[in-house]
Image (cartoon, coloured by chain):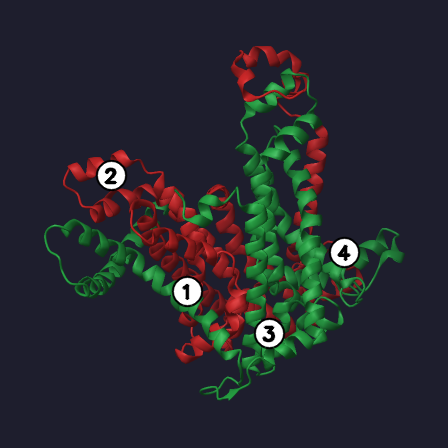
Chain colours: A green, B red
Amino acid sequence: MSNSNFGVESLTVAEGARGIGLRNGGGVQALPPSRPRRRGIDWGQRLEIAVLSGPAILMFLGFVILPLLMAAYYGFYRWKGFGVPTNFVGLENYKTILQDSAFREALWHNGLIVVLSLVLQGPVALGFALLLNQKVRGRSIIRVLIFVPYVIAEVIVGTGWSLLLQTNGAVNGFLRSMGLGWLTNEWLANPKLAIWTLMLILTWKYVGFAVILFLAGMQNIPEELSEAAAVDGASYWQTQRRITVPLLGPTIRIWAFLSIIGALQLFDLVYIIWGQYVSSTAGVSTMATYMVTEGRNAGNYGYGNAVAVVLFLISLVVALLYQRFVLRRDTQGALTGGR
Amino acid sequence: MVTTAGSTRLPTAQVSAPRRRKSSKDTRWGNPIVYIAALVLIGLMLGPVLYIIAGGFRTNAQITANPAGLPSPWVFSNYTEVLKSSSFWRQVGNSTIAAGATTIGVVVFGVMASYVLARYQFRGRGAMYALFAAGLMFPITVAITPLYILVKDLGLVNTLPGVILPQIAFGLPTTIIILVPFLQAIPKEIEEAASIDGSSRLNFFWRMVLPLSVPGLITVGILAFIASWNSYLLPLFILNNQNTFTLPLGVQSFASQYSVDTAKVLAFTSLSMIPALVFFSVFERRIVGGLTGAVKG
């Protein structure tokens, strides 16, 4: 099948990469004073480590870490993105950001989205996961189907929903045909409603991911536990409340972490549905849309980079706090380097 | 009330079978409420998608007259027109190249680094793992502004490599987090046997590790492919030339260009989601397995 094709393909490509890596490794090996023989095996091993991990580390440093450092540097300049920045303004950009009411609004929206995502998606996903965790026929098909919105591109979701929700769109049409005409609304333009519309779309798109994670977590809970509870006369709900949900804790906490980080950096859907100008008037702008609108679209690259730094720091602080206080026991392995 | 696992040493099956009336009675079909709820859930999740697909088979007049209706009669011209347009196929081509190259890069570099992290003991291993794990915390959004400048300095604006290289870098954390436990699970005995047979560690990597890790490689490969296929922000910054547009940019520009022609936009949109859906449904088990493996790790 395609499996074998895939394997072969990656093998040959990897071989090429190995050739490149070997040359790099040669340089590395030549650097320290050679202590031959005794530590020969060690050097071979170091060479292998350098060759194998070199490309990934270089790519990661070059395209993930370096841009972050660049942002920190350019954030101190007023700079239009051409040539070498010369107009050093110190912390001026950061002052402007923190004093800009548009940014503070965006920050508030982000905070709202973080909380509402957890509050809306968590219980819904948990409910559906409990439901689907029972012996259900066609469970694997159901699993595939509820994951569909998660797999569809944000652009498609955004385009589709903005057509569905426009004034003469299908949602209002459907409500009218059901005799619920009074419920029709400007789902996207009404500033009081827009953030809830956004939450609805976000829930629709990402709840399937939560359900899948929770279901997988539940499958790791030994069946003996609920059997034992049943022997002791526990009802279905007692079993779920006392056994399944507590044991699902690690999965829920990881999901919440991913959800928080995603909500803080939300960009695509807002930008696609509301565009760069409408998002702030509709009350759905986020830090990321602010960054793009005020930075790149306005040609103020220095300022945009400063916003990126602020976004980075906020995400970092939230992530560290979360890991320090919530995730500590679960991810010790993942974040402290494993065994 | 609730006992510990220890009490299950009893012949549980026989004891509990008569008690659990519910499950013994309907092991076949289970509770009907479950199916109703599941149907509602699926309806909510698929409704909008089906609407987009069905809308492509209607005319604009039909959509205006009854926005929430079904096609009557069915019209195929929207789909055939999109399928005949060269810009659609160019965007499919660009998306395929970008996603394919990203996938190869992520898988190749990812498995090499994961092998080191999984099977070698060296100083700095923990730091290296932490470096990649930290990458999970920062999606591309945070770095996009400086990344654009970097790509511009490299002269790669309006080229597919300008999208591919950053995507490989940002795909590595997920890949490595998923693959490291996978590679650690390969029994030590196999490695020892190989080394007794005189095979070097690199040889072992080629001959044993790669073939054994094909399922894991497929998981991370599909994830990388779908992420690239759907990615919007990076192409939005890097690709400004119509000729280099990937499908998401194409969908957006098509939607604004033909904003009056709703039916055609719906047809274009449904056609562009097919590949990700096909990939996903074929490899669903692997993807879900990989994601949950990463979460457990």
Q: What amino acid is at disc 4? A: Ala
The chain ID associated with circle 4 is B
The reply to whether the C-beta atoms of the residues labelled 3 and 1 are less than 8 Å apart is no
Estimate the x, y position of residue B147 in percent, counting from the top left.
47, 72
Q: For this rendering, which residue is in front, B119 or A158?
A: B119
Q: Residue furthest left?
A: A37
The reply to whether the C-beta atoms of the residues labelled 3 and 4 are less than 8 Å apart is no
The Cα–Cα distance between marks 4 and 2, rounded to whole angstroms, is 61 Å
Q: What amino acid is at disc 1? A: Ile
Q: Residue at x 64, y 19 (%)?
A: A230
Which is nearer the N-term, disc 4 or disc 2?
Answer: 4
Q: Which residue is mark 1?
A: B97
Q: Is the residue marked by circle 2 packed among few (<14), some (14-19), or many (20+) residues within 10 Å?
A: some
Task: Indicate the quadrant where residue B78 lies.
Answer: bottom right
Answer with left or right where residue A6 lies relative to residue B240. left
The Cα–Cα distance between marks 3 and 1, rounded to whole angstroms, is 27 Å
Which is nearer the N-term, disc 1 or disc 2?
Answer: 1
Q: Residue at x 50, y 74 (%)?
A: A71
Q: Which residue is mark 2?
A: B191
Answer with left or right where residue B192 lies relative to residue B74. left
Q: Which residue is mark 4?
A: B68
Which numbered mark, 3 or 4, is in the foreground of this view? 3
The Cα–Cα distance between marks 1 and 4, rounded to whole angstroms, is 37 Å
Give the structural element (helix, strand or loop) at label 3. Answer: helix
The chain ID associated with circle 3 is A
Q: Residue at x 53, y 11 (%)?
A: B11
Q: What amino acid is at disc 3? A: Val
The reply to whether the C-beta atoms of the residues labelled 4 and 2 are less than 8 Å apart is no
Give the structural element (helix, strand or loop) at label 2. Answer: helix
The Cα–Cα distance between marks 3 and 4, rounded to whole angstroms, is 35 Å
Estimate the x, y position of residue B294 in percent, counting from the top left.
47, 45
